[in-house]
Amino acid sequence: MERIRLNLDLSRHCLETEIKSKYNKKISNCLKSENIGKSMEKEIEALKTALEIFDFSYFRTHYPCLAGGKTDKVCLADDECGMPLIEINGKQVPSALRKK
């Protein structure tokens, strides 16, 4: 199974805003395109899932670079089960999921 890895630019805004922005741009591109690939579908699904399940407040509080204004290398990837995860400078951070 092909894994995803999306670089996130948090130099001007927080993790949540960046993921929302990427999600909206990808949806917009899909609506303009006649044919979207499997990788684009996986990226959109990962972004959507991250928006639904991540506890962004926890991430911003416990990982200051995820609050924005930093230049750390941050990416959204997926695990072997296809669940989204965050990496900071190449290291996976424990998932912070919203309480139900």
Image (spheres, helix red, strand yellow):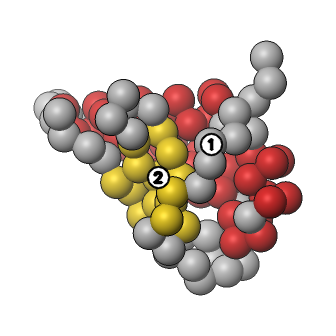
Q: Is residue 18 left or right of residue 40?
A: right
Under circle 1, the secondary element is: loop
Compute the Cα span from label 1 to label 2. Answer: 11 Å
Residue at the image point whose x is 45% and y is 32% from the top = 83
Please name the residue shown 33% across and 35% down the image.
80
- Quarter of the figure with residue 5: bottom left
- Please provide percent x and percent y for residue 61: 85, 58
Number of numbered discs visible in the structure rendering: 2
For residue 76, the mark is 2
**Residue drawn where x is 17% and y is 33% of the image:** 1
Sooner in the amino-acid sequence: mark 1 or mark 2: 2
**Residue at which label 1 appears:** 95
- Left or right side of 53 for 47: left
Q: Where is 87 relative to 19, above or below? A: below
Expressed as whole percent of the image width and height from the top left, the position of residue 8 reads 50, 63
Residue 6 picture quarter: bottom left
Crowd tier of the residue under label 2, counting other residues whose Cα lies within 10 Å: few below 14, some 14–19, many 20 or above:
many
Is label 1 in contact with label 2 (beta carbons under 8 Å)?
no
Secondary structure of residue under mark 2: strand
Quadrant of the image containing the C terminus = top right
Q: What's the residue type where badge 2 is placed?
A: Leu
Q: Please rate how many residues cluster around mark 1, counting C-alpha atoms within 10 Å: few if below 14, some from 14 to 19, many from 20.
A: some
**Residue 59: mark in rendering:** none
Front-most of residues 17 and 63: 63
- Residue 10: where, in percent of width, then height? 61, 70
Is residue 28 in view? Answer: no
The reply to whether residue 60 is visible in this rendering is yes
The amino acid marked with disc number 1 is: Ser
Please state the horizontal and vertical placement of residue 54, each as a whole percent of the image.
Answer: 66, 37
Q: Tell which tag, 1 or 2, sits nearer the viewer.
A: 1
Q: Residue at coordinates 41% horizontally, 49% vertically from top-left? A: 77
Is 40 in front, or is 88?
88
